[in-house]
Structure formats: C-alpha cells, structure tokens
Image (tube, rainbow, N blue to C red):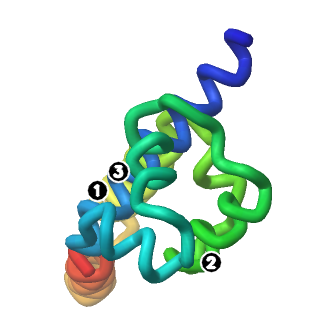
C-alpha cells in the first residue's frame, strides 16, 4: 500500500507541474485526454491511481515518457543537473567570450521552453 501511495503522490505532483506549465485546468485536461473531470480530480488529490491507459493518455497529452509521471522529484532533479552542467561549462577557463555567449543563448532558449 505504501508503494502505491508514493507513486500516486509522484503522479499527482508531476501532473500538477505539467498542468501549471501548460496553464491547464483539470476540466481542460479531462476533455483533452477523454477522461472524466472527477477522475482527474481524484488523481490530483491522490485519491486513486490512474490506470495504465490513463497514464499513457496523460503522458501523450504532454508529449512525455510515461515514466516521468511516476518519478518523484524528477522535474527538480533534471533541472538541477542541467543548471549544474551549464554553470560548470560557463565558468570553464577554457572558454572564450563567444562560447560563453552560446551557452547563455542556450540557457535563455531552455528558459523560454520551460515557460511554454
């Protein structure tokens, strides 16, 4: 039972992050993935596990791997690794100003993508 509750919490948390990034309400999500609004509400409130079919629909809606929805703190971990790599590269003494500019442009591109 504990194992399932952890997975539900991860699904709920990751789904909330995705909905926020896409400025989507529960009713919109329900309509787009063809599940009932009450089912979306139950998933968001950690009251039920989504079925495999629903999990696949949700992942497809956001164009992500379904495993993303099951991973706790996945979003924060990925973002921190990306930030750490960019910072390390940016601070490298071997880079010239042009290369640093390219890294800065990439970082700005990533920021813009994360707000879509």
Q: How many marks?
A: 3
Q: Measured from the top left, where is residue 107 in percent x and y?
A: 27, 74
Mark positioned earlier in the residue sequence (2 or 1): 2
Q: Is residue 52 above or below residue 60?
A: above
Q: Which residue is mark 2?
A: 60
Q: How far is disc 2 from disc 1 in space, using C-alphas?
A: 38 Å
- Quarter residue 59 falls in: bottom right
> What residue sits 46% from the left and 41% below the top?
42
Q: Are marks 2 and 3 in contact (CB under 8 Å)?
A: no
Mark 3 Cα shell of 10 Å, populated few (<14), some (14-19), many (≥20): some
Q: Which residue is mark 1?
A: 91
10 or 105, which lies in front?
Answer: 10
Residue 92 visible to the viewer: no
Q: Tell us which disc is closer to us: 1 or 3.
A: 3
Residue 16 has which mark? 3
Residue 14 coordinates in the image, percent (x, y): 45, 48
For marks 1 and 3 on the same chain, the one whose residue lies earlier in the sequence: 3
Question: Who's the residue at 54% across and 43% down the image?
Answer: 11
Q: Secondary structure at mark 2?
A: helix
The alpha-carbon separation of the residues under discs 1 and 3 comes to: 34 Å
Which residue is found at the position 26% from the left and 71% from the top?
Answer: 24
Residue depth check, mark 2 versus mark 1: number of the one nearer the observer:
2
Rendered location of residue 61, percent (x, y): 54, 78
Q: Nearer the viewer, residue 94 or 78?
A: 78
Which one is in front, 37 or 51? 37
């Amino acid at each position: 039972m504990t194992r399932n509750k952890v997975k539900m919490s991860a699904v709920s948390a990751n789904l909330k992050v995705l909905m926020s990034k896409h400025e989507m309400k529960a009713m919109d999500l329900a309509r787009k993935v063809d599940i009932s609004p009450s089912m979306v509400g139950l998933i968001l409130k950690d009251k039920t596990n989504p079925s495999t079919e629903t999990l696949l629909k949700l992942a497809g809606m956001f164009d992500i791997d379904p495993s993303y929805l099951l991973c706790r703190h996945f979003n924060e971990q990925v973002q921190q690794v990306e930030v750490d790599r960019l910072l390390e590269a940016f601070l490298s003494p071997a880079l010239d100003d042009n290369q640093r500019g390219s890294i800065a442009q990439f970082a700005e591109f990533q920021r813009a993508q994360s707000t879509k």
